[in-house]
Amino acid sequence: MRNANIVKSDRGQIVIVLALVLPVLLLMAGLALDVGILYATKAKLSTSVDAACLTAMKNLSDNSPQAQATAGQLGTGIFNANFGANPPTPSVTFPTDAHGAQQVQVTATAYVQTFFMRYLPQWASVPVSATAVATRGKLVMSIVLDRSGSMCGGTEHCDSGVTGDNGGEALKAAVPLFLANFDNSSTGDEIAMSSFASNATVDSTINYSFKTPITTAVSALSFTGGTFGTGAGPAPSESNTSIGPPLSLAQAQNGSITPLPGQNIVRVIVYFTDGLMNTVQDNFHCGGKTSSTLTLINYGGHDSGSQVDFFDPTSATTDWGNYTSGTGFPYTAGGAICKDSNGNIVTKFPSQQSGTQVTFSQSAVTAEAKYRAIQTAIALRTATPATFIFAIGLGTGVTTTTQAFLAQLANDPSYTATYIKGQPSGLFFYIPSCTGSALTTCKAQLNTAFQTIAAKVLLRLT
């Protein structure tokens, strides 16, 4: 019996179990510690290559060896700053995707010295790698510029008797610097330029190698006439692809570039003005009973009052005259009065905003111009691929109300009352004055606005 009790006793067995389990527990704790260190290193490495990739892409003005070297150096510097002490050396390369779109690829590997896993020789030093790839989508952009009479001043050409600001001079200085941010090569970005006053024109059709033709077109701008800055609204059939509403001209230019299957295209419109658009465009039957021909007419032209002028859409300077209640409006240089197919004098215009015929007045035309512009902007932002719109307003003519309107045009998220969630967000910039001694400051502010837009465009990445 005594021997049996000795055999049945459990005393001391926990020591044996602990001796067997403790090494396993210590190994698991050590493994957890080493894995935690590996995870933290991986996270730091991923953050560092992401920052390096974005920095390199932002500073890659083109795909030349010099630009790549500069972008690589800046990317490496940001990588080191984010990683901290003893950073590994990242690899920064500049491949292209299947469609020739420029990419930046940053890869880095850090070797982590383990604490517990080192007892297994093959795990004494564990490599941790991270890679980031940024693709600069092909940029398809139209620049839309105000050349109305109020832009004159200083050395610029002005309408007789018109006192404007120096917006034209500041604009001519800023646009070439803006263009320098983009890929001017024969396979790079494609950019167009349109301008508007009492009429609108495509001054440089969308194409590669855009810097010289657009710089030349900007330099040649003459500032005269009203502010035909609108779009065609929800009835784009009224838009003429060569002399139509400016936003619709830009829409047609950008839309002429069709993305290939799987290709990433970034569409952008940059809209600059020094006042509120006050002119629209429509087709009118003006031949009376003797003709069924439609005449394309621009009309509006004043910021206040009731006067409505009528303009030849092919000319920045041809003003056919104004509307006079009871006697109608002229639609030719010879002063012929517009009469409809019944022979009646035309006294109303087709309002897309109300869906009815509205009697001519400047306030009604200006409201219609704003409506058509906003509808065109919404169509641009909801198309596939969507368009990002950036707006710049300059001078005292851009009142608080006009600023809010331009912000709505751009869908600027800081203007919460008009911001549309789910649509591409742009930005609106306001420059208070370009007159007289303010010219130097104005030039700097306008250049900053354009450069900020360039930075935003360059970072529209996938």
Image (cartoon, grey):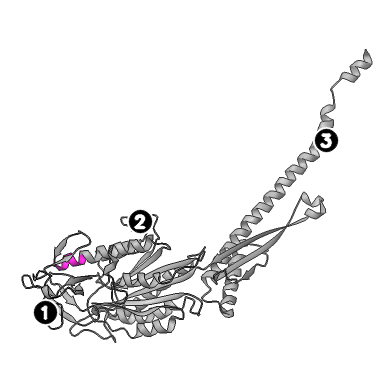
Q: Secondary structure at mark 2?
A: loop
What's the magenta bit mostly, secondary-structure-wise?
Answer: helix
Which residue in the rendered view is the most extreme toward the left? 326
- The residue segment tinted magenta is 359-366
Give the percent coordinates (x, y) of residue 396.
Answer: 25, 72
User: For residue 20, which numbered disc appears in the image?
Assistant: 3
**Residue 414 location, quadrant:** bottom left
Q: Is residue 363 magenta?
A: yes
Which badge, 2 or 1, is on the more N-terminal residue?
A: 1
**Residue 210 location, quadrant:** bottom left
Marks 3/1: CA distance?
108 Å
Which badge, 3 or 2, is on the more N-terminal residue?
A: 3
Type of the residue with mark 3: Leu
Which residue in the rendered view is the most extreme toward the top? 1
Write down the residue under mark 2.
Answer: 420
Type of the residue with mark 2: Ile
Q: Secondary structure at mark 3?
A: helix
Write down the residue under mark 1.
Answer: 336
Type of the residue with mark 1: Ala
Taking the image as drawn, is residue 279 in sight? no
Q: Nearer the viewer, residue 286 or 109?
A: 286
